[in-house]
Image (spheres, helix red, strand yellow):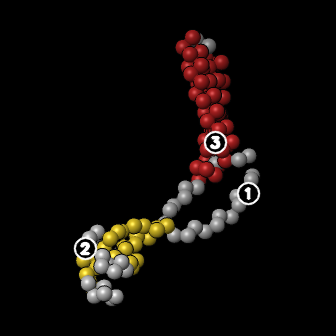
Amino acid sequence: MSARARAFLGIVLLVASIALFAIAMFTALSGDWSTSMYMTLASLVLMTASGLLAASSAAAAFVPVRAFEVKTEITCPSCGLREVRSFKKGDYVFKEVGECPRCGKGRYISSIFREEEARKAKPPQEEL
Protein backbone atom coordinates (compact mmCIF):
# COMPACT_ATOMS: atom_id res chain seq x y z
CA MET A 1 0.00 0.00 0.00
CA SER A 2 1.43 3.40 -0.93
CA ALA A 3 2.02 6.19 1.56
CA ARG A 4 -0.75 8.30 0.05
CA ALA A 5 -3.25 5.43 0.34
CA ARG A 6 -2.23 4.87 3.97
CA ALA A 7 -2.73 8.54 4.79
CA PHE A 8 -6.15 8.57 3.10
CA LEU A 9 -7.23 5.40 4.90
CA GLY A 10 -6.03 6.85 8.21
CA ILE A 11 -8.13 9.98 7.70
CA VAL A 12 -11.20 7.91 6.77
CA LEU A 13 -10.75 5.77 9.90
CA LEU A 14 -10.35 8.86 12.07
CA VAL A 15 -13.52 10.48 10.71
CA ALA A 16 -15.44 7.21 11.17
CA SER A 17 -14.20 6.85 14.75
CA ILE A 18 -15.19 10.42 15.63
CA ALA A 19 -18.67 9.88 14.15
CA LEU A 20 -19.03 6.58 16.02
CA PHE A 21 -17.92 8.25 19.26
CA ALA A 22 -20.51 11.02 18.81
CA ILE A 23 -23.25 8.44 18.20
CA ALA A 24 -22.08 6.51 21.29
CA MET A 25 -22.37 9.63 23.46
CA PHE A 26 -25.87 10.33 22.12
CA THR A 27 -26.81 6.71 22.85
CA ALA A 28 -25.46 7.04 26.39
CA LEU A 29 -27.53 10.18 26.96
CA SER A 30 -30.58 8.28 25.69
CA GLY A 31 -30.08 5.67 28.41
CA ASP A 32 -28.74 2.61 26.54
CA TRP A 33 -25.46 2.16 28.43
CA SER A 34 -24.38 -1.25 27.11
CA THR A 35 -24.67 -0.28 23.43
CA SER A 36 -22.92 2.99 24.21
CA MET A 37 -19.98 1.17 25.82
CA TYR A 38 -19.57 -1.16 22.82
CA MET A 39 -19.69 1.76 20.40
CA THR A 40 -17.15 3.71 22.46
CA LEU A 41 -14.83 0.71 22.50
CA ALA A 42 -15.17 0.32 18.72
CA SER A 43 -14.46 4.03 18.32
CA LEU A 44 -11.27 3.75 20.38
CA VAL A 45 -10.13 0.76 18.30
CA LEU A 46 -10.67 2.77 15.09
CA MET A 47 -8.76 5.74 16.54
CA THR A 48 -5.86 3.46 17.46
CA ALA A 49 -5.82 1.97 13.95
CA SER A 50 -5.86 5.46 12.47
CA GLY A 51 -2.93 6.51 14.64
CA LEU A 52 -0.91 3.43 13.70
CA LEU A 53 -1.51 4.08 10.00
CA ALA A 54 -0.45 7.71 10.37
CA ALA A 55 2.69 6.73 12.27
CA SER A 56 3.72 4.13 9.71
CA SER A 57 3.12 6.38 6.72
CA ALA A 58 6.34 7.12 4.87
CA ALA A 59 5.04 10.54 3.82
CA ALA A 60 4.80 11.67 7.44
CA ALA A 61 8.17 10.18 8.39
CA PHE A 62 10.31 11.78 5.65
CA VAL A 63 10.74 15.53 5.41
CA PRO A 64 13.40 16.62 2.90
CA VAL A 65 15.94 19.16 4.12
CA ARG A 66 17.34 21.48 1.49
CA ALA A 67 21.03 22.27 1.93
CA PHE A 68 22.52 25.35 0.29
CA GLU A 69 25.63 27.48 0.33
CA VAL A 70 25.60 31.31 0.26
CA LYS A 71 27.79 32.89 -2.44
CA THR A 72 28.95 36.46 -3.10
CA GLU A 73 29.45 37.84 -6.62
CA ILE A 74 32.08 40.55 -7.01
CA THR A 75 31.97 42.72 -10.17
CA CYS A 76 34.23 45.33 -11.71
CA PRO A 77 32.07 48.06 -13.34
CA SER A 78 34.88 49.15 -15.69
CA CYS A 79 35.96 45.91 -17.37
CA GLY A 80 33.05 43.63 -16.37
CA LEU A 81 35.19 41.02 -14.56
CA ARG A 82 33.03 38.83 -12.32
CA GLU A 83 34.20 36.63 -9.48
CA VAL A 84 32.14 34.33 -7.25
CA ARG A 85 33.33 33.39 -3.77
CA SER A 86 31.84 32.06 -0.55
CA PHE A 87 29.91 34.53 1.58
CA LYS A 88 31.84 36.12 4.44
CA LYS A 89 30.35 37.81 7.50
CA GLY A 90 30.02 41.53 6.81
CA ASP A 91 29.37 41.20 3.06
CA TYR A 92 26.63 43.43 1.66
CA VAL A 93 25.60 44.57 -1.81
CA PHE A 94 27.58 47.55 -3.23
CA LYS A 95 30.37 47.08 -0.67
CA GLU A 96 33.78 47.95 -2.17
CA VAL A 97 36.12 44.98 -1.91
CA GLY A 98 39.39 46.11 -3.46
CA GLU A 99 41.02 46.64 -6.82
CA CYS A 100 40.36 44.71 -10.01
CA PRO A 101 43.29 42.46 -11.00
CA ARG A 102 42.63 43.16 -14.69
CA CYS A 103 42.18 46.97 -14.87
CA GLY A 104 43.19 48.18 -11.38
CA LYS A 105 39.94 50.05 -10.65
CA GLY A 106 37.61 49.42 -7.70
CA ARG A 107 35.34 46.37 -7.48
CA TYR A 108 32.12 45.97 -5.52
CA ILE A 109 29.77 43.19 -4.41
CA SER A 110 27.01 43.03 -7.02
CA SER A 111 24.91 40.21 -5.57
CA ILE A 112 24.58 37.72 -2.75
CA PHE A 113 22.76 34.49 -3.56
CA ARG A 114 22.42 30.90 -2.46
CA GLU A 115 23.23 27.76 -4.40
CA GLU A 116 21.61 24.43 -3.62
CA GLU A 117 24.04 21.59 -3.12
CA ALA A 118 23.71 18.58 -5.41
CA ARG A 119 21.17 16.12 -4.10
CA LYS A 120 22.06 12.50 -3.57
CA ALA A 121 19.88 9.92 -5.28
CA LYS A 122 17.41 8.38 -2.85
CA PRO A 123 17.20 4.60 -2.78
CA PRO A 124 13.79 3.29 -3.84
CA GLN A 125 11.37 2.74 -0.97
CA GLU A 126 10.13 -0.75 -0.34
CA GLU A 127 6.44 -1.45 -0.20
CA LEU A 128 5.31 -3.27 2.93
Q: Is residue 77 visible?
A: yes
Residue at numbered disc 3? 7
Between 125 and 69, the one nearer to me in the picture? 69
Q: Amino acid under label 1?
A: Glu
Give me the C-alpha separation between circle 2 and circle 1: 52 Å
Q: Is residue 86 visible?
A: no
Quarter-of-image position of residue 31: top right
How packed is label 2: few (under 14 Cα within 10 Å), some, or many (20 or more)?
Answer: few
How packed is label 1: few (under 14 Cα within 10 Å), some, or many (20 or more)?
Answer: few
Give me the C-alpha separation between circle 3 and circle 1: 17 Å
Question: SS at mark 2?
Answer: loop
Between 99 and 41, the one nearer to me in the picture? 99
Question: SS at mark 3?
Answer: helix
The label on residue 76 is none
The picture places residue 85, in percent across and down from the top left corner, at: 39, 78
* Dots 2, 3 in contact, CB < 8 A: no
Of marks 2 and 3, the one in the foreground: 2
Residue at numbered disc 2? 95
Q: Is residue 46 above or below residue 19?
A: below
Picture residue at 55% right of the left edge, 55% below the top = 63
Residue at numbered disc 1? 126
User: Please, which residue is most extreme toward the front here?
Assistant: 79
How packed is label 3: few (under 14 Cα within 10 Å), some, or many (20 or more)?
Answer: many
Picture residue at 44% right of the left edge, 70% below the top = 69
Q: Amino acid under label 3?
A: Ala
Left or right of 15, for residue 67: left
The picture places residue 81, in percent across and down from the top left corner, at: 37, 80
